Amino acid sequence: MLDKKFSKARIDRELLLSGDAVIKVTNADRSVSKVGLGKMAVEAGAGITGGTGTIYRTSVIRTGGIIKTSILIDLTGLASSTTDLDIIGQGASVAHIGRITAANNGTILSGRITCLEAAVGGVTDIDMYSATEGTGVFDGGVAALTETALVTRGAAWAIGDIKALTGIPAANEYLYLTGGAGGTAASYTAGKFLIELDGYDA
């Protein structure tokens, strides 16, 4: 039951068949509008999701005019290569980690990467880029694409590290994780990250 102080409030709830939810709560001194949009419109390519033991999940939530996109990824089963700025992934399929669209993610204003578990096995200095092309594959150089550096770590990630985006992905660009330094080609056996992007209605 509702608390008595909300007994006179007008409460509208709509459950959409798509699984998205719209909840509006209005009373004399409060107005809340929250929409669960679900996932990114275009999620990671098979060069990411095809990894053995790899975990990849996304969430997009709109609260008022603010849209928050989250990407949770465990690099286990993916690999880095020997060359700086080569794309992290596996196999020969495209290895982007999702595409930003204005309709789904809004105009991106800011963002950050949080290390939840230090990477083990592959290169531990990991960067993030966006590119207009969605064709980048594992072991391919991100510099061969029309790219923008979003996060250049400059060192190994440690658990608890948070790095803000220094570049902003534009609408319709794809996101990539790359090795931030040269190293021995190897598969990751650990490495968990949370990527958060703050967007707004244009």
Image (spheres, grey):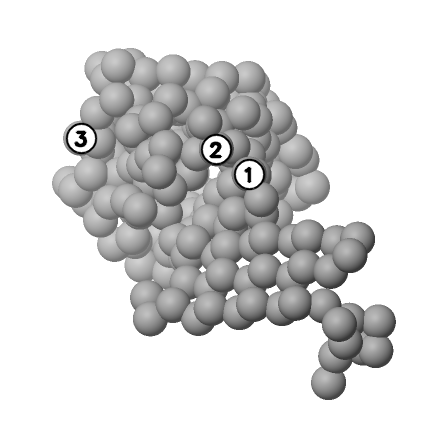
Which badge, 2 or 3, comes first in the chain's sequence?
3
Q: Residues within 10 Å of mark 2 (few under 14, many from 20)?
A: some
Vertical comparison of 36 with 64: above or below? below
Which picture quadrant has residue 110?
top right
Quick check: 191 left or right of 169? Answer: right
Q: CA distance from mark 2 to mark 1?
A: 5 Å
SS state under label 1 = loop
The residue wearing badge 2 is 201
Indicate the secondary structure of the residue bearing disc 3: loop
Q: Mark 3 belongs to which amino acid?
A: Thr
Decide which of 93, 83 is in the foreground and name it: 93
Instruction: Single out the mark in the foreground, 1 or 3.
Output: 1
Q: Evaluate if marks 2 and 1 touch, with contact meaning CB atoms under 8 Å apart.
A: yes
Category of crowding for the residue at label 1, using alpha-carbon neighbours closer than 10 angstroms: few (below 14), some (14–19), many (at least 20) = few
Q: Position of residue 1 (x, y in %)?
A: 73, 85
Q: Is residue 178 above or below residue 25?
A: above
Residue 57 visible in the displayed image: no
Q: Which residue is mark 1?
A: 65
Label 1 amino acid? Gly
Is residue 107 visible from the viewing direction of this image?
yes
Question: Which badge, 2 or 1, is on the more N-terminal residue?
Answer: 1
What amino acid is found at the position of numbered circle 2 in the picture? Asp
